[in-house]
Amino acid sequence: MFLPKLREVKEALTSFFTAPYTTKFPFEGHTPAPEFRGLPKYNADYCIGCGACVQVCPPSAITMTDDTEKGVRTLTVNYTSCIHCGQCEEHCVTEKGIQCSNEYSISVMDLKAPEVYESVEKELALCEACGGIIAPKDQLRWIKHRLGAKAYAHPNLLLETQREFFDLTPSRPKARLRREDQIKELCPKCRHKVVVEDEFYGF
Ligand code: SF4
Ligand code: SF4
């Protein structure tokens, strides 16, 4: 009966004379551990706009919107839904496109405040025949770098490579696809049409 009480008194006295384990946040800043998973942040230099992070995000906190008028893809993290699981960082195809930062404090009165959102914009490659989306240009260049010389077998990748060095104005969409359209930047559907119609129906 008596011994447990003595142990508690000893614990209380030890705690009284030692520094607290808790931090004094918000009066003093808290330094997170190195492996802390804070607010995820995009790095526009490494993000290629592939959208893999959108697919792996468990609470669907990341959205992807494509604007074909402006030719831009926007990826946005909504911090009010983010559960800081780190899946986006873990599955990012470039490994550095999105990373959990050390930031953790996000106190706002308005849930639509800009601080609640983290976005990155990527320029889209659009089909020269139908205007549909092919992929973000950075994604095409990333694939091309991974494939090396093999990439030159595909006109889309070849044209994106040429655009890295000089301006190539895209042609205007035409009513009918022809054999020469094979060397244009086309979406899979239009490329299929060009190849199949050329092979089986003639022009
Ligand atoms: S590169 Fe990474 S961060 Fe960018 S869209 Fe793809 S998975 Fe997401
Ligand atoms: S940390 Fe998790 S919840 Fe937050 S954006 Fe990334 S995948 Fe989604």
Image (tube, rainbow, N blue to C red):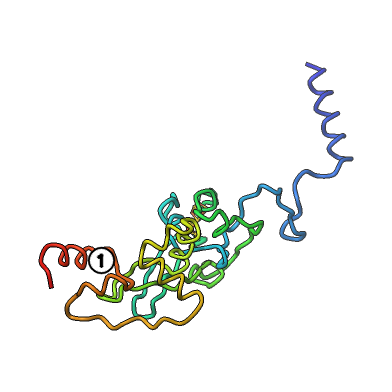
Q: Is residue 145 above or below residue 180?
A: above
Quadrant of the rendered image containing residue 185 = bottom left
Q: Position of residue 141 (x, y in %)?
A: 47, 65
Q: Position of residue 135 (x, y in %)?
A: 38, 66
Q: Position of residue 15 (x, y in %)?
A: 83, 37
List the residue tagged with mark 1: 191
Q: Is residue 200 above or below residue 179?
A: above
Q: In what quadrant of the picture does the C terminus appear?
A: bottom left
State how many labels appear. Answer: 1
Q: Is residue 154 left or right of residue 144?
A: left
Residue at x-position 30% and y-position 76%:
128
Q: Position of residue 39 (x, y in %)?
A: 59, 58
Q: Is mark 1 within 8 Å of ligand 1?
A: no
Quadrant of the rendered image containing residue 25 = bottom right
Relative to the observer, which residue lies in front, 177 or 64? 177
Q: Secondary structure at mark 1?
A: helix
